[in-house]
Image (cartoon, helix red, strand yellow):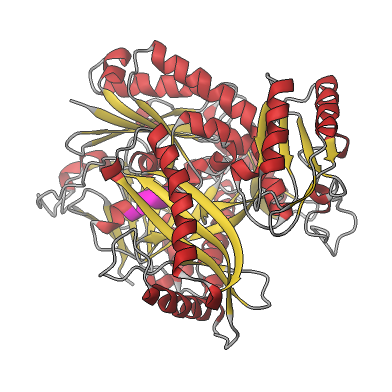
Amino acid sequence: MKYVIGVDVGGTFTDLVCLDEQGQSLVTKTPSTPSDPSIAIVNGLTKLAGLLGMDEKSLLKDTTRITHGTTVSTNTVLTWTGAKVGMLCTKGFRDTLGIRFGIRETPYDLSVPQPETLCPRYLRMPVQERIDAEGDPVITLNEDDVLRACGEFREQGVEAVAVCFLWSFRNPIHEARAAEICREQLPEVYVCASHEIQPEIREYWRMSTTVINAYVGPKLASYLKHLSQSLEAWGFTGQLLITQSNAGVIFPEVAMEQAVRTVLSGPACAPAAAAYVSKSLDLEDVITVDMGGTSFDVCLIKEGKPVTALESAVGGVYHMKLPLVDVRTIGAGGGSIGWLDQMKVLHMGPQSAGADPGPACYDRGGSEPTCTDADLVLGYLDPDYYLGGEMPLRPDLARKAIQEMIADPLCMDVGDAAWSMRRVIDHHMVDGISIVSVQRGEDPRRYTLVVAGGAGAVHAASLARVIGIRRLLVPKTSSVFCALGGVIADVRHDFVKSITSKTANLTLSSLKNTFGEMRSTADEFLDREGVSTKDRYYLKSLDMRYKGQYHELEVPLPVPESASEEEIEEVMLSRLVESFHEMHENLYSYRDDAETEVLNLRMAACGVVPTPDLHEAPLVSRDAGALHKGTRPAYFEEKGGYTDTPVYDGDQMEVGNVVNGPAIVELKTTTIVVPPDGSLEVTPYESFLIEFTQ
C-alpha cells in the first residue's frame, strides 16, 4: 500500500492527514514545537505509523509524497525574527520602502508611529543606474556602487540582499548584473532580485514583496534543508512539496528561492479542501471557516472556486503583491485569551496562549483564561477525551482562571462568564464572515458553511445562527483541513508581464508572443520539477481597468469551445471586454462606457498531482442510538443554561445516522456541538451535515 501525507504546522497543533490508494484517510494531531517545527512533524509521523501498525521508517518508505504547509515564513515576519536585510535600489529612490503609499497607516491617530521597515534605511544602498519606462538603458549600471554596497553589507553582517531597481520589470539587465555581483562577493548571503520574484509595475509593491522574500528566505531555506535531511535520514525517498499562498504546491528548492510565496501557505489550503469535499455533495457556493488554536481563517468559495486576490499585507503591515487565495484571518482561536480593559469590558484575543504554555486547562503553566477553557467549563469538551484521551484537560484550572480574571471582577457566575467569553469571540468570527460575504455584496444565507479546524465544529453552529446560515458541513477531516488541502493541490507557478496598453490596441500576435514567452519560462520550472508534459495545464488572465482608474480586476481569458488551450482567437478579445464589464458591475454595481486598459498579463502554469477520489458509501442506518456514549451538562442559551446533553461517538457513526440537538458528537480530533434546533446527519461521503429545523 502506498500513501500520500499532508502536514500543516499551526501555532498550537501540527496536523497530519494520510491518504491511501483507495482514498481512505487517517488523521492525527500533535502539539506544535515552535522552537523547531520539524520535531512536531516527526512526532506526528510516529503517531501515524502507530495507527497504521507500522514503524516510522516503513511508513516513509511506502509514502510517495509529503505535502507541507508551513507557518515559518508567516511567523518570521510577525515575530520580527527574519534575516538582516540589505537592499540595492536606484539612486534617488532609497526611501520608497519607508514612504509606502505616501499616507499614514492610521491617518486619524498621530500618536501611532509608522511601521518599521524590514530593511532599515542605513542598509538601503543607492546605485547609479536607470532604465526608462520603455525598458531602454538610460544610465549605465555603476558596478563600483554595487561593489561598495557589498563591502558595507559584509561589514554590517547582512544575511540577505534584495535588489530592486526602477523599471526592472521592463528590462532586468541592470538588476540581474547587480544580483550576480552580490552573489560573487557575498557567497554566503541570500540574494534575490525583484524581476525574479514578481516583475510587475508599481515600484513600492514590487520592492516590498522582494524585501519580504529576502527577510524570510534564509530562515525558510534553513528549515526546509533541515526537514529534508531529517526525512531522508528516516528513509523517505518520495517527493516533498511545499504549499503556497495560491493553494498550489512547489518543490522545496523553488520555495527556498521564492520564499515569499509561502507566507500564507497554511491558511490557503483549507478553501481548496472545502471545494474538494463540497463538490461531491454538489455544493458550489460555500463559506469555509477554519478555527485553530491561534487564528480564525475565512474564505468565500463561489461556483466551486475560492475567491482570489493579488494583494495582501502580512500582519496588516507588510505589503506583498502575489496571486493568492483571499483568506481573511483574525486573531480568534481556541487559545485566544480573555481579558478585561480599564473599563472592565470583556475582550477575546488577539493574544493567544499558543501551544506553550497553552490554555490554563492544559496544565502546562498557563494561567490566563482562553476560549478552550470557556468551552471546557460550558461542557462542550470532555476533559478525558481531548485528542481522543491523549491529552487530559483540567476543568478545575479552567474554572479558576475564569473565576479570578473574568467572573469575580464582573461579579458573575463562572458559567455565565464562560458563556460571555464565547459570545464575544463568536461575534468576532461573525464579523470575519461578513467581510468576505456581505461586504462583497453576497448574501451569506445562500451559502453553506464548511467547517474546519480543531475548534471550528464547537463554534460553527453559533456562528451560522447569528448570520442566518441554515446548513453546515463538517467533514471528518475538518480538524486537519489545511493538511488535506495540501495533499490535493496541484503544482503551480505564477508569472506576470506588465504591458500597460489600451485593450483596443491589443493584437492577437502580441498576446500570443507574450504568453508564449511566459509559457517557455514556466516550462523551465516544470521541467526542473519533473512534471510530465501530459500533466501540465495553463491558466491565462489579464488585469483590466477603465481608463483613469487606479485599481484593476483580474479577468480570466475566455477560451471558446472551438479553441485549444494554446490558441488565442479574435473572439476572445471581445468576450474579454464584456467579461470585465460584468465583473465590474457585479463587484461595484455599475459599468462604465469608458474605454478599457490592460495593465498585466498573467499565467499560472500547473502540474496535475494524482489525488484519490472520494468514494460514496451506502446507507447503513438512520439510528445512531448504539453510538450514544452518555450525557453531560452543556450550556445552551435556548435551554436557559446547563442542560443534560447526549454525547455520541462520531468516529464510529455510519452513513445515514441522524442525531437531533441538543447533542455533542465527539471525534478524536474535534468535537461537534449540535444546537437544540439542529439536526445532524452523516452523508454518503462520511461528513456531517447539520441543518437547522427552525
Q: Which residues are magenta?
A: 270-275
- Please name the residue shown 69% across and 31% down the image: 82
- Please name the residue shown 85% across and 64% down the image: 108
Q: Is residue 495 above or below residue 186?
A: below
Give the position of the C terminus as an image quadrant: bottom left
- Please name the residue shown 17% across and 53% down the image: 684
Instruction: State the image coordinates of residue 136 (x, y, percent, origin top left).
Output: 71, 53
Within the magenta stretch, is there residue 425? no
Could you tell me if residue 517 is visible in this image?
A: yes
Give the position of the N terminus as an image quadrant: top left
| Image-based side of 207 in relation to 495, left or right | right
Within the magenta stretch, is there residue 271? yes
Q: Nearer the viewer, residue 497 or 26?
A: 497
Q: Nearer the viewer, residue 147 or 312?
A: 147
Number of marks present in the image shown: 0
Instruction: State the image coordinates of residue 243 (x, y, percent, origin top left).
Output: 45, 39
Q: Is residue 254 above or below residue 663?
A: above
Q: Nearer the viewer, residue 142 or 293?
A: 142
Instruction: State the image coordinates of residue 609 (x, y, percent, origin top left).
Output: 30, 40
Could you tell me if residue 455 is visible in this image?
A: no
Q: Nearer the viewer, residue 666 or 46?
A: 46
- Please name the residue shown 57% across and 63% down the image: 431
Q: Is residue 650 above or below residue 691?
A: above
Q: Residue furthest bottom?
A: 593
Q: Is residue 35 above or below residue 144?
A: above
Magenta span dominant secondary structure: helix
Instruction: State the image coordinates of residue 517 (x, y, percent, origin top left).
Output: 48, 51
